[in-house]
Image: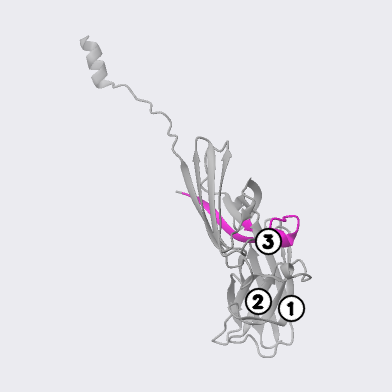
Amino acid sequence: MLLVLLSLLLFPRVGYASKKTGANVAYAKLTHSPTGSVRLSYNASTKTLVVTAKLVGLAPSSTHPAHIHAGSCQNPTDAIKYPLTDVTADQTGQGTSTTTLKNIADGIPATGWLINVHNGPKLQSADQEISIACATILNPDAATSVDATFGPSTSSNENAVGDSKLSVENNTLTVTLNVSGLVPNSTHAAHIHAGNCNYTQKVLYDLSPLQVDSNGNATKTMTFSGVSSIPATGWDINVHYSTDLSTQTGYNPVLCGNVITN
């Protein structure tokens, strides 16, 4: 008996706790898509202007007309100053465009230019003409090279914002999605994709349809069984221009947010 007591004191039994089954929680902040940048480089000797645009978050394998317009992104005009080479995107929605404009006598102005990227692939309908990304060009120092950032335009759905909460408990994923600033009474496709907002990939979970109320707001909660956890990275949430994903125009991702775990 003494030996047993000594062994318990010297070598206490190891307890094996049961595996924790608490919820795995993550969040996503949804902001305007696509995003990107543009550089304007002017050569005073040759009077040429090179415009290089790079965007992410476009529809896969899409084509987008682009122009330099008069005005600013806050106060755009329909007046096209110079047409640009179409932005063409790869299968992950990463797009580029490079244009060389000739006979630009006065260089890059201090104000009064904006660059619009349109929904496309042509400009044959109002939905195709929508500006999905806009960059205001500012050059107060009369520089020969100017960089600008693409952000939202004043077009419908392009100033929407949103958030999402995701949780897993008992192998069930619950997703709550909240969006504001969409066209009142419109309907949109929404998904959880593999990848991230810079490199979005296949659809993992379908949150469609997202129905918008008369105030431009939408809220939806869905559950998916057979999900054991949320990855630390590798998921993003997209809200699309419409529910018709068979066309580039309808597929246009107006919002994107990377899913981030606690």
Marks 2 and 3, how far apart in space?
A: 18 Å
Residue furthest out toward the front: 214
Q: Which stretch did the figure color magenta?
A: 239-261
Q: Residues within 10 Å of mark 2 (few under 14, many from 20)?
A: many
Q: Quadrant of residue 130?
A: bottom right
Q: Earlier in the sequence, mark 3 or mark 1?
A: 1
Q: Secondary structure at mark 1?
A: strand
Residue 261 in the image, given as x and y percentages of width and height: 48, 48
Which callout, 2 or 3, points at the residue further toward the start of the chain? 2
In the picture, measured across the screen, residue 62 lies left or right of residue 253, that is right
Residue linked to disc 2? 115
Q: Residue at x 41, y 28 (%)?
A: 18
- Magenta span contains residue 241: yes
167 horizontally vs 182: left or right:
left
Whichever of callouts 1 and 2 sits on the residue coming sooner in the sequence is 1
Which label sits in the foreground, 2 or 3? Answer: 3
| Magenta run includes residue 89 | no
